[in-house]
Amino acid sequence: MKGASAGKPGEVQIIEFPDMQLEAGDIIVSPLACGICTTDVKMVQKGTKEKKYALGHELAGMVIETTPQSRWQAGQRVIVAPYLPCGGCYFCLHNQQALCTHLYDVTIYPGGLAENVYVPRALAERGVFAIPDHVPNVVAALAEPVGCVLKGLEDSFYRYGNSVLVVGDGPMGLFTAAAARVYGASPVIVAGMTPHRLEIAQAFFADIIVDITRENLISVVHEHTADRGADIVMVAVSTAEALASGIEAVRPGGTVNAFAGVPEGSMVSLDIRKIHYGQFYLTGSSGVTPAHLEKALRLLSSKRMDFSQFITAQFPFSDVAEAVAYADNRTGLKAMVTFE
Ligand SMILES: [Zn+2]
Ligand SMILES: [Zn+2]
């Protein structure tokens, strides 16, 4: 089967992956839509010699082959978790499944951006969820990033009615703001530096937008939170400066979440007085669990927020390279690869 892989730095290659032999309980899913994530962009930029896996982990597809031991049937539309917490390690037992020691032991193969995707039994049993009929493929494929967002809010101790500041106006930042809105956050403040993205935020789910190239983030946040700072700050930008500004904007006792992946060696200096006297929480979030995928799919299936507005470009599988370039250049929001 063909799949899109990172190749030389900056290049996407369509290469042949070995077909997998199905064992009891395994299934094969044929992709219908797969989102392009910053992770994919980074993998392409970095390049790889190994080519063991295909790009893509935000997958909606159709079951095309099953085994008698599987509860899935050919023709069912599903979303598929990219990896599976084991359920038995120390972290899983303490309800921190994304920290699972064996998180990548069971994965899709070769990846979401491939002609066919092999789903091993354990994943088929615990990490695959049926897409309701009325939900379009491209919207269902948002379950993975939106699942990460829901997990991020939970990891930040989010509670209904909290004020939420999102630092960052990329797809993950805007998904976070939209989810916070649906979950009753008040106010939802989005800070960024891309005017057309901030406009989308303001039109659909942000109470306040802050263009940090023109406005002072901290004073805007204080103005709208009775001078306290935000209850929850989700930092969805991959820089130390963004995290530092998030820490400045949180209220005493609130939570700052380093939600964006950052390069190795990214450091911030911390004012210990602010931690000691201000007693705020600093945490991070990465990855998704099957429970959050399922929850995200329900949110996407509801009428509470139209998440299709975040999908600003669709590309056929043959144009994965263009889709990756689009995701990289900040002109739009979410790029989707479709397979019809
Ligand atoms: Zn992703
Ligand atoms: Zn585990």
Image (cartoon, rainbow, N blue to C red):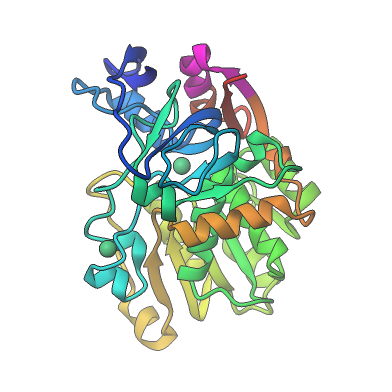
The quadrant in which the N terminus is found is top left
Q: Quadrant of residue 159?
A: bottom right
Residue at 66% of width from left, 60% of height from top?
A: 189
> How many numbered tags mark residues here?
0
Q: In the figure, 286 relative to 276: above or below?
A: above
| Residue 83 position in % (x across, y down) | 36, 48
Tell which of 247 and 153 is nearer to you. 153
Which stretch is magenta?
314-325
Residue 315: where, in percent of width, then height?
Answer: 59, 19
Residue shown at the point (45%, 20%) measured from the top left: 115
Quarter of the image for residue 198 reads top right
Does the rendering let one see residue 49?
yes
Residue 239 appears in the rendering: no
Q: Is residue 331 magenta?
A: no
Is 316 magenta? The answer is yes
Pinpoint residue 286: horizontal percent, then vertical percent: 39, 55
Depth check: give the residue in front, 166 or 218.
Answer: 166
Q: Going 46% across and 57% down the picture, which residue do you hit?
A: 290
